[in-house]
Image (tube, grey):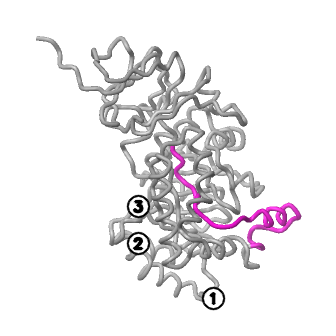
Amino acid sequence: MSAIVPACDTLWTGARLLPMTDPARPDALIEDAVIAARGGRVVYAGPQARAPAFRPERIIACEGRLVTPGLIDCHTHLVYGGSRAGEFEARLAGVSYEEIARAGGGIVSTMRATRAASEAELVAAATPRLADLIADGVTTVEIKSGYGLELAAERRMLLAARTLGAKLGVSVSTTFLGAHAVPPEFAGRADAYLDDVIDVMLPALADEGLVDAVDAFCEGIGFSPAQVERLFAAARRRGIPVKLHAEQLSNLHGAALAARYGALSADHLEHLDAVGIAAMAASGTIATLLPGAYYFTRETVLPPVAALRAAGVPIALATDCNPGTSPLTSLLLTMNMGATLFRLTVAECLAGVTIHAARVLGRDDIGALAPGHWADLAVWDVSAPAELVYRIGGRPLHARYWRGQ
């Protein structure tokens, strides 16, 4: 009796495949590989010699090119109004980020421009930024709210994020970041504003299906751990996963708090301590490092990469694309920064924008090329995986497939 051949509508042949299915060996290559997909999902990815005798409707010849999973940018603030180039110039003159924020700039400056923008204007402004990421092989992106700081504007941001995904053919995960800053109308009343976030914004936006995760900015210029815990408790009651901007400017032990709530990730982490690392390791919380922000703000305290590595905490990388501290729209450059600034290995950088980034989004169907996963592929004109991390500039992407198309 002949073996049953799984159905396949698309077959990529002649690939040098980096499937990212083994976290211990994320840079393990399979030579002369094929990838088969049906209905936008992978049914086989591996050596040609072991592949079933597929009869596909479409064959795509990779001609020896490197094929990886589509890249994942798991932390962005891609949707916003206005520009903060003037603040960049001020920082070049020696003004600190905290001083700018306390003087009414920073997040509040972007808030004013975002509140004044329509949903269509937000989509139009964000489209070229997302197009840049797509040109780097990105097939999934997380987009946070947090520049509206009122229900109507936060809703417009999240709706714009969803519209961008449909418009450009990319998976979008939306994160509610209402606890990003205290808006001027609540000046001196952070707890009252947080009541509005918890009692008004979160229920309304979650009921509309716009919230995939809840985030907060845990800093002296943001929200205290006690305030963040109130928000996390509200998210838990609704069954919504959480993540946290933590230990970027100081150590408020936000990462340990996030870990207690089983957070998907704690992000930035320049001032993370051993207690926070142990808590993250125990909870499975991913460390998302953002070298673009580190570079752009001229930070000098490095995140504790060696200690995270020793504790077995998985590390993700993301652009943190935002108007004030990381106007970065290249995930390839992010990997280079992760290697050069944070001393990550090539394998760690690649895992950081694929399998580990998928976990930051709570996804087990992207980030690797394995049966059942979405057929999100990036085909590269490079000689080796290291070239994706080594280059500064350039566009080595040959082709990108999102859900097989």
Q: Quadrant of the C terminus?
A: top left
Q: CA distance from mark 1 to mark 2?
A: 25 Å
Compare marks 2 and 3 and give the one earlier in the sequence. 2
**Element marked by disc 1:** loop
Q: CA distance from mark 1 to mark 3?
A: 30 Å
Q: Amino acid at mark 1?
A: Gly
Q: Amino acid at mark 3?
A: Asp
What's drawn in magenta, residue-wise? 72-100
Return the residue at label 1. 188
Q: Is residue 273 visible to the viewer in this orientation of the structure?
A: no
Q: Residue at 34% across / 72% down in the picture?
A: 207
Return the residue at label 2. 205
**Element marked by disc 2:** helix
Q: Which mark is residue 290?
A: none
Magenta run includes residue 94: yes
Q: Nearer the viewer, mark 2 or mark 3?
A: 2
Crowding near the residue tagged with mark 1, few <14, some 14–19, many ≥20 C-alpha atoms within 10 Å: few
Q: Toward which corner of the image does residue 3 lie, by quadrant?
A: top left
